[in-house]
């Protein structure tokens, strides 16, 4: 057992010292440069802990920066220069983002699709849905079904535009990538896009990249020791590229199969070969990650990015966050389809969000087209379903420094949903709506 009991976080909070987090951080850095031997990360972590114990006076709680400095030292002294470089760059990137966060109001972000946002905001103003107050007014006037119809029509137009663009590319197009962060509505949108292309004589054939996961013991872990399925490095990216090249060349390939129950991948399970009118579909969180399709020429790829780009201000004049909408969606979907406690979804979301910022959001402006999957009418439904839960979670996590992120999100969402007039009846929501993917009642099978 370590002689060190606590660590000081950047926020000043004092939390229990967990050596396994050092192991996880080292292993994640190693995975990013192709390393897959966790035992090496464990040995290096033990060296870091020994140095901490030797250098810290009795009763001293080291700062997180002290620990990270020692990690860099141990990596370099043990000859792991590439891992150390990635670890250092990651620290630098996190520091840069903290600095940008502190100055967010004075500097625009390159990750924001400004042209699309202006379009969505203009739509929201025209439909009197750009503020919570206006939304509530329309609901009070009995216009909830009308709001549903208007929102669904805007989404349908986006899907039709993407379908037309893909069809226009003709035979030159070989791969369609549908991507976006968690719970952005990829599954429903993919179904609708496939149906639209079939009407034009084209067929999307899915290459399920989930089958390319490495075996579970080779996955990196998050800071709480849970296996990380959110990072692109959990996938065998070289094998994906090899199979894409061969499929486009007209060859037959044998697709692997990943068993999530056992955490093992079986090689050469399912044959796949493209017909003349078929286009490869990749539906993945990490579809825009450059290494995912780096072997395929740009003219053969079409990237479609999804995000609930809601443009609505709360009573404090702050825009409701897209990530909060997706958090609620995932809570409802996980609870309904995966028997997963929404509270655990909240506790894990900080990690999901960190992975999105590292591996997904950075590439949003590389997409060929953006589909807005936000439905302004979803907020009144969420107010009915989850308001009391967020109040309870905010109270539960208020004084827990290890759950500061969960507290912040729960408190923020409670304040937002408390302002919105709740709607109990979701019958006006059509069965083919993207929202049905999360609230249930869809006509599609997921």
Image (spheres, rainbow, N blue to C red):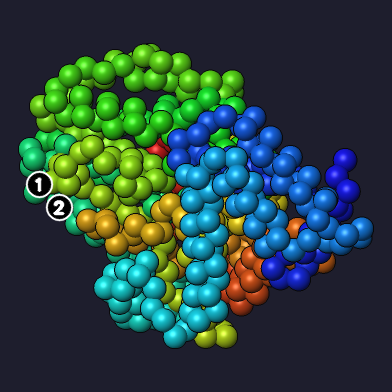
In this rendering, the answer to whether 420 lies above or below 360 is below
Mark 1 Cα-neighbour bin, 10 Å: few <14, some 14–19, many ≥20: some
What is the x, y in percent for residue 102? 55, 79
The answer to which of 82 and 139 lies nearer the viewer is 82
Instruction: Please give left or right for residue 403 compared with residue 304 in the image.
Output: right
What is the x, y in percent for residue 15? 80, 59
Residue 403 visible somewhere in the drawing? no
Q: Classify mark 2: helix, strand or loop.
A: helix
Residue at 40% from the left image edge and 38% from the top image edge: 444
Residue at 78% from the left image edge and 61% from the top image edge: 62
**Which residue is under mark 1?**
169
Q: Quadrant of the N terminus?
A: top right
Is the Cβ of the residue at disc 1 closer than 8 Å to that at disc 2?
Answer: yes
Question: What is the number of callouts on the image?
Answer: 2
In this rendering, the answer to whether 126 lies above or below 283 is below
The answer to which of 376 and 176 lies nearer the viewer is 176
Residue 227 visible somewhere in the drawing? yes
The answer to which of 136 and 160 lies nearer the viewer is 160
Mark 2 Cα-neighbour bin, 10 Å: few <14, some 14–19, many ≥20: few
Q: Quadrant of the C terminus?
A: top left
> Residue 165: which disc?
2
């Amino acid at each position: 057992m370590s002689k060190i009991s606590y660590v000081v976080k950047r926020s000043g909070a004092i939390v229990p010292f967990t050596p396994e987090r050092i192991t996880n951080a080292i292993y994640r850095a190693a995975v990013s440069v192709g390393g897959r031997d966790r035992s090496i990360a464990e040995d290096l972590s033990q060296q870091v802990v020994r140095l901490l114990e030797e250098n810290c006076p009795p009763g001293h709680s080291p700062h997180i920066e002290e620990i990270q400095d020692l990690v860099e030292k141990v990596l370099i002294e043990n000859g792991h220069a590439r891992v150390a470089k990635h670890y250092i760059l990651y620290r630098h990137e996190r520091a840069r983002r903290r600095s940008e966060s502190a100055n967010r109001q004075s500097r625009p972000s390159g990750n924001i699709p400004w042209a699309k946002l202006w379009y969505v905001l203009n739509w929201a103003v025209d439909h009197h849905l750009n503020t919570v107050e206006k939304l509530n007014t329309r609901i009070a006037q009995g216009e909830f079904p009308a709001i549903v119809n208007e929102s669904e029509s805007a989404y349908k137009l986006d899907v039709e535009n993407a379908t037309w663009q893909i069809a226009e590319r003709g035979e030159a197009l070989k791969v369609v990538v549908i991507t976006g962060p968690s719970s952005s509505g990829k599954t429903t949108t993919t179904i609708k896009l496939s149906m639209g292309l079939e009407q034009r004589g084209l067929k999307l054939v899915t290459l399920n990249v989930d089958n390319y996961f490495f075996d579970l013991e080779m996955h990196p872990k998050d800071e709480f020791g849970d296996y990380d399925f959110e990072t692109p490095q959990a996938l065998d990216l070289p094998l994906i590229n090899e199979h894409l090249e061969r499929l486009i060349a007209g060859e037959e390939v044998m697709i692997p199969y990943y068993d999530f129950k056992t955490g093992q991948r079986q090689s050469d399970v399912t044959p796949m070969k493209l017909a003349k009118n078929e286009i490869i579909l990749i539906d993945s969180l990490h579809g825009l990650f450059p290494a995912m399709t780096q072997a395929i020429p740009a003219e053969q790829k079409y990237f479609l990015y999804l995000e609930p780009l809601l443009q609505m201000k709360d009573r404090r004049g702050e825009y409701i966050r897209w990530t909060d909408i997706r958090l609620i969606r995932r809570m409802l979907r996980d609870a309904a389809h995966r028997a997963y406690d929404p509270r655990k979804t909240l506790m894990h979301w900080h990690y999901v969000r960190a992975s999105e910022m590292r591996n997904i959001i950075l590439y949003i402006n590389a997409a060929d087209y953006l589909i807005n999957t936000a439905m302004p009418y979803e907020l009144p439904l969420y107010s009915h379903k989850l308001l009391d839960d967020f109040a309870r979670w905010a109270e539960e996590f208020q004084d827990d420094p290890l759950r500061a992120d969960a507290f912040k999100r729960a408190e923020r969402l409670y304040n937002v949903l408390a302002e919105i007039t709740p709607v109990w009846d979701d019958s006006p929501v059509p069965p083919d709506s993207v929202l049905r993917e999360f609230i249930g009642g869809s006509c599609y099978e997921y």
